[in-house]
């Protein structure tokens, strides 16, 4: 059966009709072989125009349709829907742009008409080579995995759980809360951090459709959006989460004391421990690296002291498998270690702290119960904050450190009203409307801000720390203080590379997870169904992390609906196995990891569930085996040949 092509030219009111001789184009294309009808319409995108097109397809029994009108970006999908409603496969439709590409840029009517005629002829040539494409749907798993139990992970989990989704929350440490759990107050409102965080932690732990797996790590992921299979290693806790009531009777008898990581090395903990008072879940864990019993020595002190029989030294790691439809990475970030910069004296001189160490000193559940003390037990009379530590080495501004230091200076003034505070900065970053207010408040209290042009160094003279710096006038100056606080850059977690390999998603040049598009898809990744939120994607404050977490959860709720099938991208790549030479060029170039190798056949195979139809493999294939549906070489060549005549 010969093709029955219908051509419809839109006048778009005066936009096209006043510049292009539409009637002459219609008369010309009527005589082309295969074209059974050609007509014009004043406004095809209107309801009347769409109804007219639908009736034409049915009446003329069309097998191909060409519409010459405005940009396809505006109405192509609407016209394709009309074709489908009329019983025509929508991929047997082609739209060409004679408004933006002709009428709006070619004032001469003769030239505009000739250009529009060529584009119409090119579209007719092309549509003859188009083939029907069937849309595919797959069943999906609506459950969601969230990796990271910080503030962003908690927000995502609750947003999803409130809409009835099953959520698996995986946290590698023994408790949830992340960095926020280390804080006493948060900027810019100076709100009590535990008062803000604890209700979220409690709700997550008590929510029936949230399964929290602390002290656990993801070991492997396979699958695609809607159908991921994830292997999770639940590390042996050696304390039963069911039997333990968190009484703490096991702590004191333990003979081992080691540095407490949660307090940034400012306190000690036992081999059986909770990271901090108030940690949730309120179930301790045994550190097998330092536990005498788990190292093969005789000791049962904690087990003997437990009145509930909750301690089990025979506990083993367990690998569990979860099937989910989407995954959110909310793994947070780390802070640059200033010990690698000897000019600051960190680790060599007493009373030089990082900002997180000062945070723990300030915390009521910290090593000093919230008192700001020097090594000698006295309160400092002067403190220097050094901004941008590690900024030059990392190569970027973290954006949140200035306000973080401003907050700490505010807290020091609240607790030590007579303390002298000096802030040494190179650039001051106060990006949000609330930030200036807090900055103004502490400057009124006498906190000094000193801009320096070159690296600051710290030395020790007696009991005092001496900050040497160059001012804006390049004059060498020095200030003696009791305490120095180093505000370090935010940097990626060390395990980002491992997770990026699991999910086959890229890291940026700094080592953070790379988003698909920095403006339009700032929390999506190149692997559909995997989202990155919070500071694992880049330095963020709590407000931005929470907003991004809520947005990613909303995207999942809108795309992965319970009981509905997931429609796959129809315009994807395909590989002709008769031509494929098995060179694997396409596999390494695919930005969506949608191509794998069939070892038995020694050919490349496209996974339709992952492919986005970008065409990278098509452009790179040396044999022409890779083809993009609806954008084949034959279709594009046919279009170009007519335009080039």
Image: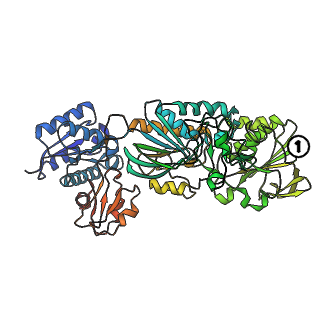
Q: How is the image coloured?
A: rainbow
| Camera-nearest residue between 314 and 473 | 314
* Structural crowding at the residue carrying mark 1, measured as other residues with C-alpha within 10 Å and reported as few (<14), some (14–19) or many (≥20): few
Q: Position of residue 304 (x, y in %)?
A: 66, 41
Q: Residue furthest right?
A: 462
**Horizontal arrangement in the rendering, residue 170 relative to residue 427 (left or right):** left
Q: Position of residue 509 (x, y in %)?
A: 55, 59
**Horizontal arrangement in the rendering, residue 141 relative to residue 355 (left or right):** left
Could you tell me if residue 577 is visible in this image? yes
| Camera-nearest residue between 61 and 616 | 616
Q: How many marks?
A: 1
Determine which quarter of the picture holds residue 643. bottom left
Quarter of the image with the C terminus in it: bottom left
Residue drawn at (29%, 36%), measured in percent from left and top? Answer: 13
Q: Is residue 28 above or below residue 280?
A: below
| Camera-nearest residue between 421 and 205 | 205
Callout 1: SS: loop
Which residue position holds label 1? Answer: 378
Q: Is residue 273 above or below residue 461?
A: above
Q: Is residue 495 above or below residue 325?
A: below
Q: Position of residue 220 (x, y in %)?
A: 45, 53
Could you tell me if residue 274 is visible in this image? no
Q: Position of residue 366 (x, y in %)?
A: 74, 40
Residue drawn at (61%, 33%), measured in percent from left and top? Answer: 245
**Horizontal arrangement in the rendering, residue 106 relative to residue 218 (left or right):** left
Q: Residue furthest left?
A: 1
């Amino acid at each position: 059966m010969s093709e029955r092509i219908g051509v419809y030219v839109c006048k778009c009111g005066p936009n096209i009709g006043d510049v292009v001789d539409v009637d002459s184009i219609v008369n010309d294309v009527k005589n082309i072989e295969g074209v059974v009808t050609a007509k014009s319409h004043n406004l095809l995108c209107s309801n009347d125009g769409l109804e007219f097109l639908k009736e034409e397809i049915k009446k003329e029994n069309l097998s191909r349709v060409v519409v010459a009108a405005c940009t396809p970006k505006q109405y192509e999908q609407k016209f394709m829907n009309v074709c489908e409603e009329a019983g025509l496969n929508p991929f047997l439709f082609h739209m060409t742009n004679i408004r933006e590409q002709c009428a709006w840029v070619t004032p001469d009517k003769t030239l505009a008409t000739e250009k529009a005629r060529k584009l119409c002829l090119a579209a007719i040539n092309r549509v003859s080579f188009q083939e029907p494409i069937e849309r595919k749907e797959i069943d999906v798993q609506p459950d969601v995995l969230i990796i990271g139990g910080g503030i962003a992970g908690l927000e995502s989990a609750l947003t999803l759980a409130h809409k009835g989704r099953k959520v698996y929350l995986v946290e590698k440490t023994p408790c949830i809360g992340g960095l926020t759990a280390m804080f006493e107050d948060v900027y810019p409102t100076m709100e009590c951090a535990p008062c803000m965080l604890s209700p979220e932690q409690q709700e997550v732990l008590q929510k029936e459709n949230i399964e929290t797996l602390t002290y656990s790590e993801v070991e492997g992921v396979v699958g695609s959006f809607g159908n991921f299979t994830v292997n999770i290693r639940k590390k042996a806790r050696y304390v039963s989460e069911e039997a333990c009531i968190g009484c703490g009777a096991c702590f004191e008898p333990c003979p081992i004391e080691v540095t407490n990581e949660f307090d940034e090395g400012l306190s000690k903990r036992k081999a059986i421990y909770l990271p901090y008072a108030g940690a949730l879940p309120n179930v301790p864990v045994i550190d097998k690296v330092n536990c005498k019993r788990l190292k093969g020595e005789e000791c049962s002190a904690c087990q003997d002291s437990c009145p509930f029989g909750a301690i089990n030294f025979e506990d083993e790691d367990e690998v569990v498998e979860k099937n989910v439809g989407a995954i959110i990475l909310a793994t947070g970030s780390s802070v640059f270690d200033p010990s690698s910069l000897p000019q600051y004296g960190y680790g060599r001189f007493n009373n030089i702290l990082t900002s997180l160490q000062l945070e723990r000193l300030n915390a009521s559940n910290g090593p000093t119960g919230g008192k700001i003390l020097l090594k000698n037990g006295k309160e400092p009379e002067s403190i220097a904050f050094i901004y941008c530590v590690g900024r030059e080495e990392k190569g970027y501004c973290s954006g949140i450190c200035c306000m973080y230091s401003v907050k700490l200076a505010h807290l020091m003034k609240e607790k030590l009203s007579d303390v002298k505070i000096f802030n040494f900065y190179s650039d001051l970053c106060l990006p949000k409307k609330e930030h200036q207010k807090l900055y103004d408040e502490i400057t009124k209290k006498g906190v000094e801000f000193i801009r320096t042009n070159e690296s600051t160094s710290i030395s020790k003279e007696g009991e005092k720390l001496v900050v040497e710096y160059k001012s804006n006038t390049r004059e060498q100056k020095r200030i003696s203080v009791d305490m120095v606080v180093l505000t370090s850059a935010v940097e990626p977690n060390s395990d980002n590379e491992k997770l990026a390999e699991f999910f086959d998603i890229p890291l940026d040049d700094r080592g953070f997870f790379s988003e698909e598009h920095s403006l339009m898809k700032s929390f999506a990744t190149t692997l559909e169904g995997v989202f990155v939120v919070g500071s694992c994607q880049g330095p963020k404050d709590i407000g931005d992390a929470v907003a991004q977490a809520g947005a990613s959860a909303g995207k999942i709720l809108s795309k992965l609906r319970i009981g509905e099938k997931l429609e796959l991208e129809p315009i994807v790549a395909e590989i002709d196995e008769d031509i494929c030479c098995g060179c694997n060029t396409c596999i390494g170039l695919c930005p969506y990891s949608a191509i794998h190798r069939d070892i038995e056949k020694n050919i490349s195979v496209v996974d339709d569930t992952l492919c986005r139809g970008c065409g990278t493999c098509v452009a790179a294939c040396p044999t022409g085996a890779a083809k993009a549906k609806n954008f084949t070489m034959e279709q594009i060549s046919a279009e170009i040949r007519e335009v080039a005549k």
